[in-house]
Image (cartoon, coloured by chain):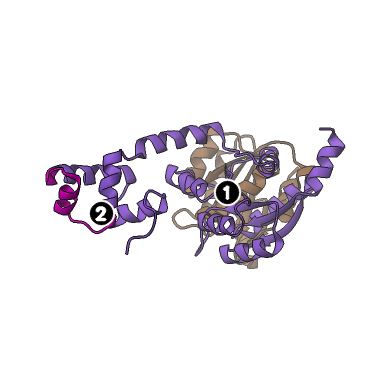
Amino acid sequence: MRHDEADSVDRSLRILIVDDQAIVREGLAAVVSAHGMTVVGEAGDGESAVAMFRTLRPDVAIVDLRMRPMDGAEVTRAIREEDRAARVVVLTTYDTDEEIFLALQAGAASYLLKSVDSDRLVETIRGVHAGRKMIAPEIASRLADHVASAALTPRQQEVLEALAEGKSNQETADALYISEGTVKAHVKAILAKLGARDRTQAIMIGVRRGLLRRVPE
Amino acid sequence: MAADRPVPERLLVVDDNVDAADSLALVLALGGADVRVAYNGPDALRVFDDEVISVAFIDLGMPGMHGVEVARQLRARDVSGLVTLVALTGSGEPEDIAEALQAGFDHHVLKPAGVDELLAAMRRSR
């Protein structure tokens, strides 16, 4: 692509910036504007962000992860529910595996740390707009490790589903034709893999991660 | 901002408010700087001992080691005499600013600071 063509493409890119810190919104706006993109909206909280997305339909939304009361993963999920093709870049200082996992699962196309420089930011926006997932190799590698270590075995999945149905250990054992002791061992392994402190939290995490199809009644 | 990018240099942001510190660091990094962050005074001193810092932005109202004390100690360790210290003040009271300048700060910026104000404080040091 010739340089003038790239400029023309960038000029048509419409960006929504979502961050609760005014200075970050200002800094991001300066960078994307300097690269010929158009900032169509700036939101300081999650609810405003979703409303702005609905009205403005930006090409790419840059969303801070840590906001209250609606965090960046929730904003991402809400935006993607508005439009399954919405492109979201999540931006954060925090890089715990769980946060990366939740942001990407919510539908973010990229996860950038706040140590990002302007060239990388612009490259990411362009790539995401082109429909690519832009995940840094080091994050992709950690994500793969996280998924592998946290994946439930088919039997553990069955036990988790039984927990979500409200079955006791004995009822689960009877349903799966295994001993109650084996069920307890599976429950212990499930709690460890999901990082849950008890059954209730395991079910909540299971729902959030899509391991369980719906919130149990 | 990006079009007016400063020469890459190493900056230090010191603030106990993690979100504020990280946000300021992001903006400075987007401007082309190499940025370090410390969330308290003792950590700031450690970073300063290990790295060559050209400008430090220091929040005054930190618990534990106050920003003024951080500035005094950084100034005492700055054997080259080249570091620029910028105080981030919440009140803007004349006596606070006077105390900051007396402690060794070169400039002060009222929080919440805008990008232009911060870059201007950096440029005034050159």
Q: Nearer the viewer, residue B42 or A93?
A: A93
* Foreground disc of the pair 2, 1: 2
Return the residue at label 1. A90
Q: Is A160 in the magenta?
A: no
Residue A125 percent across, percent down from the top left: 68, 44
Q: What secondary structure is found at the residue carrying circle 1? A: strand
Q: Residue at x 41, y 53 (%)?
A: A208
> Which residue is tagged 2?
A163
Which chain is mark 2 on?
Answer: A
Question: What color is chain A drawn in?
Answer: purple
Which badge, 2 or 1, is on the more N-terminal residue?
Answer: 1
**Residue placed furthest toward the right:** A4
Identify residue type, mark 2.
Leu
- Residue A197 visible here: no
For chain B, give the colour. brown
x, y (%) of residue B90? Answer: 59, 64
Judge by depth and name the residue closer to the eye, A50 or A85.
A85
Q: Residue A29 at what x, y percent from top left?
A: 72, 53
Q: Which residues are magenta?
A: A163-181
